Image: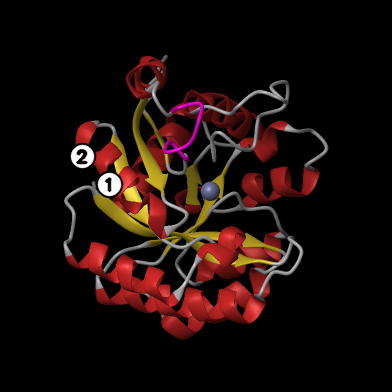
Amino acid sequence: MSYRFIDTHCHFDFPPFTGDESASIQGATDVGVQSIIVPATQAANFSRVLALAENYPPLFAALGLHPIVIEQHSDDCLEQLQQALDKRPQKLVAVGEIGLDLYRDDPQFDKQERLLEAQLKLAKRYELPVILHSRRTHDKLAMHLKRHALPRTGVVHGFSGSVQQAERFVQLGYKIGVGGTITYPRASKTREVMAQLPLDSLLLETDAPDMPLNGFQGQPNRPEQVVRVFDVLCELRPEPADVIADALYRNTTALFDF
Ligand SMILES: [Zn+2]
């Protein structure tokens, strides 16, 4: 039995995909990955990500300023984001990757919050969902999302946190991105969260080339690995596989409107 999948988070504008786009997309579509959403991380990559989406039918673009490269973002970058959104590119489906991160040294958190606020406002103005990154910042992020009440909400990608934190995002109307973390038996907390949340709140993702799955450490992650993430999710959840596959697909197309 084969299903159709969408990788809602793949950094396809980075190696090993650069220069190997056609073969990489073929490898993914061969196992049922119909579409791949490519979130940009900084203004310098916006045109690359948009060009990928224009040139390859399975690819869709998101544009945003990622907190992990906070030092790369000048005020001019926000201006560039607004100008790019203003052109309403056909295959642009979200603002992202945006968010908060307290994992790294010198996080410049005030600047992170200022950029997040500005980008949430842009998402509202251009009626787009958001793709959110959050590490050690779930409560802060939830506060910002509550304040802005985006009509199209978004997804908290690569979620690892408590059931309570996940439920708070779900109550605010956000989806939760399920990735390779659940393939590690030691990630029992995240596995439990993904087993317990309502099925209609979940999306599949890889975060490729990052976040290699269990058994694939040291290798670049790839979009076709959503199928393995899906298989593990099916082991964790009570519903039959076809019901899960169908829900994940519909959750994704409904959120991103394609
Ligand atoms: Zn990412």
In terms of secondary structure, what is the magenta stretch mainly? loop
**Is 211 rendered above or below residue 130?**
above
* Residue 13 belongs to the span the image colors magenta: yes
Which quadrant holds the N terminus? top left
Q: Which mark is residue 163?
A: none
| Residue at (65, 31) in percent of width and height | 212
- Residue 127 is situated, as x and y percent measured from the top left of the image, at 26, 69
For this rendering, which residue is in front, 144 or 110?
110
Q: Which residue is mark 2?
A: 54
Up the image or down, 21 lies above or below 64; here it is above
On the question of residue 151 being in view, the answer is no
Q: Which residues are magenta?
A: 11-17
Q: Choose top left, top right, bottom left or bottom right for residue 149.
A: bottom left
Q: Which residue is mark 1?
A: 50
Give the SS element for disc 2.
Answer: helix
What's the residue type where badge 2 is placed? Glu
Determine whether label 2 and label 1 are within 8 Å by CB: yes
Residue at the spot x=27%, y=46% of the render? 50
Side of 39 where 156 appears, left or right: right
CA–CA distance between discs 2 and 1?
A: 6 Å
Q: Quadrant of residue 142?
A: bottom right
What residue appears at the point 19 percent right and 68 percent down from the top-left corner? 86
Name the spot of residue 133 as percent of width and height, x first.
Answer: 56, 59
Count numbered badges in the picture.
2
| Res. 61 in view | yes
Where's residue 152, x and y in %? 33, 67
Give the farthest residue toward the bottom.
147
Other-residue count near label 1 (Cα within 10 Å), few / some / many at <14 / 14–19 / ≥20: many
